[in-house]
Amino acid sequence: MFINRFPKMAALQKFRALALGFDEKTAEAIGIAEATKYAIFKNLSYRRRKEQEAAEVQKRYKRAPEELDEETFALFKLQALDGLPFVGHRTYGAEDYQRAIFLRFGEEAGKSIESWAKNIIATCDNETLQSERKFFEKCWKPHRDEDPLQV
């Protein structure tokens, strides 16, 4: 079975969030939102993405752009709406993570993906985990093409 980069990024980000002190459900929400952010916005600046998401909140959700919270997930450069990460025109919760990892690939493969991610995060220092750029370069890039089912 081939595991693409999306679930691997989601699992890595989940364990990064756990290492930085977030609870399990919030870490899973961050994991899936971060993977989505990387997939959709990898070539789009944070400022420009914030502007697009603020416009979408106003248009789709009929809520004031000021309702997007910049502080809750500032470390991940994610906005929050109602306490959940907001990226790609929607909020993400733990159930989205479970669906992307365990329902899509099965319980055994999901556990392998998470074990792979947990082992990588254990080798990253706190300074690396707190910097998106350092995390990308030191924790993600060297491991992104590994097969978590073979490790």
Image: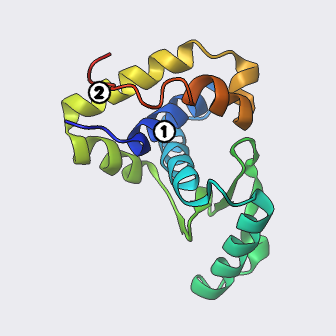
Say which quadrant the N terminus sits in.
top left
Residue 81, percent across and down? 64, 64
| SS at circle 1 | helix
Q: Residues within 10 Å of mark 1 (few under 14, many from 20)?
A: many
Taking depth in this image into account, of 79 and 135 the one nearest to the observer is: 135
Residue 8, percent across and down? 42, 36
Say which quadrant the C terminus sits in.
top left
In this view, 52 is above or below 115 = below
The residue indicated by pointer 1 is 9
Residue type (three-letter) at the residue carrying disc 1: Met
Q: Earlier in the sequence, mark 1 or mark 2?
A: 1
Asked whether, in this view, residue 90 is left or right of residue 74, the answer is: left
Residue 96, percent across and down? 39, 53
The residue indicated by pointer 2 is 111
Asked whether, in this view, residue 28 is left or right of residue 148, the answer is: right
Asked whether, in this view, residue 89 is left or right of residue 3, the answer is: right
x 33%, y 26%: residue: 147
Choose mark 1 or mark 2, whichever is in front.
Answer: 1
x 40%, y 47%: residue: 97
Residue 150 lies in quadrant: top left
x 75%, y 32%: residue: 131
Taking depth in this image into account, of 21 and 6 the one nearest to the observer is: 6
